[in-house]
Amino acid sequence: MPPLLEQGLGPHLRAFSEGEYHRLQEARILLAHEQQVLVNGCVVSADTRRPRLFTANEYHRMAEVGILHPAERVEFINGRIFSMSPKGPVHTEIVNNLESCFQGLFEGRARLRREQPVELGELGQPEPDMAVLRLSPRRYVTNHPKPENIRFVVEVADTTLTYDLTIKNETHSRSGIKEYWVVDINNRRVFVFTRPGPSRYRSERICTEDESVSPAAFADAIVPVRVLLDLTES
């Protein structure tokens, strides 16, 4: 796991209490024959001490039985559940910039979803800061958008940069999302990843605040990096 995650600076594995561990057993998410134990809040194999990976159905079951609470900020990625830090004011303002910019560029051409789940099957159910979707006559009311519905996704990173550039990069690429942006607040740049591969995106471009970027699906849409990072009152 990347060092930033190990140090707890940003996303970290969600710890389970003893009571929650027993509720996992009562809900038959953990079965007796699996021989799992709780070590420092992590469910691991009694023999190998490897973390127990959860399925998408098990993740949803935890919410149904109240182990995961509605107010908790968690993400399900690659069989693991990560606790997410609260979003600060700068992060929120940059997401506001994204929304304002994209509304003007993609009105009538795409649907925007802000901080809502996308469905990647067993690879997880992340909640990107912004997802730019294909227009759908049913507006995604029966299912969350899947990779084939997604034009591109964007994450805004302050304390989450390592997580977004490693774990999420791998997850989005493996799922087949065609394009993935990471807005790096602290270094004032945008990473643009395209050409998904089996482990990571094959193409990476880093755009500084003096440059502009255009998503592959909308080559005529010019997004100045400086506009996304602007924190002044207009």
Image (spheres, rainbow, N blue to C red):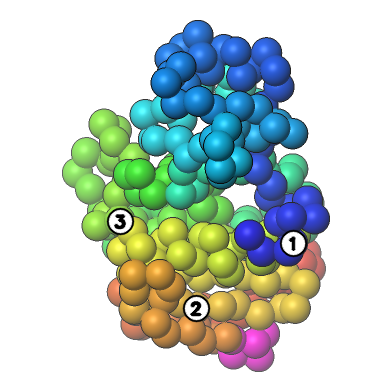
The spot of residue 127 in percent (x, y) is 50, 46
Q: Earlier in the sequence, mark 3 or mark 1?
A: 1
Residue 88: percent from left, percent from top = 78, 50
| Three-letter code, disc 2 | Val
Q: Which residues are magenta?
A: 207-211
Quick check: marks 1 and 2 in contact, CB under 8 Å? no
Decide which of 188, 100 is in the foreground and name it: 188
Is 164 magenta? The answer is no
Quick one: which residue is furthest to the top in this view? 26
Query: At which x and y percent is residue 234?
Result: 73, 67
Horizontal side, residue 56 vs residue 3: left or right: left
Residue 201 visible somewhere in the drawing = yes
Q: Is residue 23 above or below residue 192?
A: above
Q: Which residue is mark 1?
A: 4
Which of pointers 1 and 2 lies earlier in the amino acid sequence? 1
- Is residue 17 left or right of 31 when viewed as pictured? right
Q: How many badges with numbers are in the image?
A: 3
Eye-nearest disc, 1 or 2: 1
In front of the other: label 3 or label 1? Answer: 1
Residue linked to disc 3: 147
Disc 1 crowd rating (10 Å Cα; few below 14, some 14-19, many 20+) is some
User: Which residue in the structure is indicated by mark 2?
Assistant: 192
Q: Is residue 192 above or below residue 87?
A: below
